[in-house]
Image (tube, grey):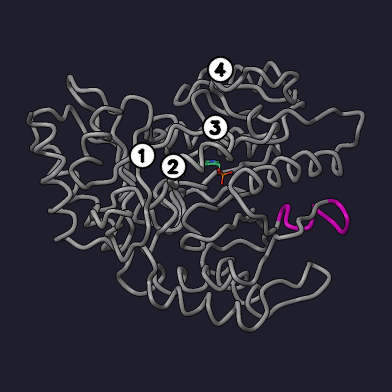
Amino acid sequence: MNTIEKHNMHVMPTYGRFDVVLEKGSGCVAVDEDKKEYIDFGSGIGVNSLGFCDDDWADAIFSQAHAVQHTSNYYYTKTSSDFAERLTTATGYQKLFFGNSGAEANECAIKLAKKYSFDKYGKQAGRNIIITLENSFHGRTIATLSATGQEVFHNYFFPFVGGFVNVKANDIADLKEKLATYENKVCAVMFECIQGEGGVIPLEKEFVNAIFSECEKRDILTICDEVQTGVGRTGKFLASENYNVKPNITTLAKGLAGGVPIGVCMADEKCCDVLSKGTHGSTFGGNPISCAGGNVVLSKVLADGFLDEVSKKGEYFKSELEKIDEVEGVDGMGLMIGIRLKTKNAAEVAKACLDEGLLVLTAKDKVRLLPPLTISKQEIDKGIKILKNILDR
Ligand SMILES: *Cc1c(COP(=O)(O)O)cnc(C)c1O
């Protein structure tokens, strides 16, 4: 039995996969079982921020695995303390909680926001509603699915968690109306600066400003889900920096440790001590191997000039893509790119790219690119050439 048959026999069929077995990779190139090479414009789904198997990253993980791989959270490790210090310093947050995925980071944010209001206003106040946006995506656990503002996800798994109210993205009137309807009942507003799974849709500046001013007035916490947009993806370390706002809570995951599981929920001085001893936890959270990977990602992404390069590469992508006839427009920021097509089907384009040796993603009806942040101009050119040939057909 080959790898694909074996997998399908023994693993639950929850994903639509391409029939490719990736065997190894280096930088922005992946290699399959038949030694066919692929330029990587997806980095997993924005996870391999330094590309495949960066030497410094792999060395740090190797060393950590030979020193101590796990301790439980009854003890401390220098690697995770160092990582927490660097990440909070870089982002201006006070403290963080360690989980292992985006959904877990958001679960933590949801619990934190509810407890913040409970502690301050009491159980009777019932101040526990969280506003999320239509077309958002926050994860696959029951609570984060309930938070996700897309009806397609609200199926099968009834009952969902109550207490989430959706507002239309970029609709300030709807935001104000829902805040009025649920006056004194809302504890947080949660949003992605650029809706990723929803189709690479950036929020408008005025809408983000409205979220912050309305929440400020009512002591409502702001939660920014930067699981996809964070860690340099948009040309700033946090996408919220593009909007000049500082949410009370920011969650990170995908690209944070360069390809090993991690998720963090970061909180500011207002709410960083809400989750007290015994109120939250995770067996694997803060795993030193993940943190060792994260330390290398932070060193590189925060190095002088790195984020400017990400922005420049993003601009270059945009200008090259816009030259293609079939491209209707390009959305996103930095290296988070959504390509609107005039006539072609995004999923079919992605399959054709794969056949021609290019890995791309889709989001709704767009072709989505989340290349490694370290991608070179040469690799961009090579990949775009493949994409252009397919779109020109
Ligand atoms: C991917 C993603 C998640 C979920 O992350 P997992 O690691 O799959 O749990 C949550 N929010 C956003 C914005 C994402 O892109």
Looking at numbered disc 1 in the image, what kind of residue is underneath it?
Asp
**Label 2, label 3: how far apart the Cα atoms are:** 14 Å
Nearest-to-viewer mark from 3 and 4: 3
Horizontally, residue 303 falls left or right of residue 80, namely left
Sequence-wise, which precedes: disc 4 or disc 2? 2
Does the stretch in magenta take in 104? Answer: no
Horizontally, residue 36 falls left or right of residue 207, namely left
Please state the extent of the stretch shown in magenta in the rendering.
Answer: 270-279
Q: Which residue is mark 1?
A: 19
Does the stretch in magenta take in 276? Answer: yes
Contact check, label 1 and label 2, Cβ < 8 Å: yes
**Label 1, label 3: how far apart the Cα atoms are:** 15 Å
**Label 1, label 2: how far apart the Cα atoms are:** 7 Å
343 shown above or below 34: above
Q: Which residue is mark 2?
A: 4
Q: SS of the residue at dot 2?
A: helix
Sequence-wise, which precedes: disc 4 or disc 1? 1
Q: Which mark is residue 151?
A: 4
Sequence-wise, which precedes: disc 1 or disc 3? 3
The residue that appears at 70% across and 58% down in the rendered structure is: 97
Sequence-wise, which precedes: disc 1 or disc 2? 2
Contact check, label 4 and label 2, Cβ < 8 Å: no
Looking at numbered disc 3 in the image, what kind of residue is underneath it?
Thr
Contact check, label 1 and label 3, Cβ < 8 Å: no
Q: Which mark is residue 14?
A: 3
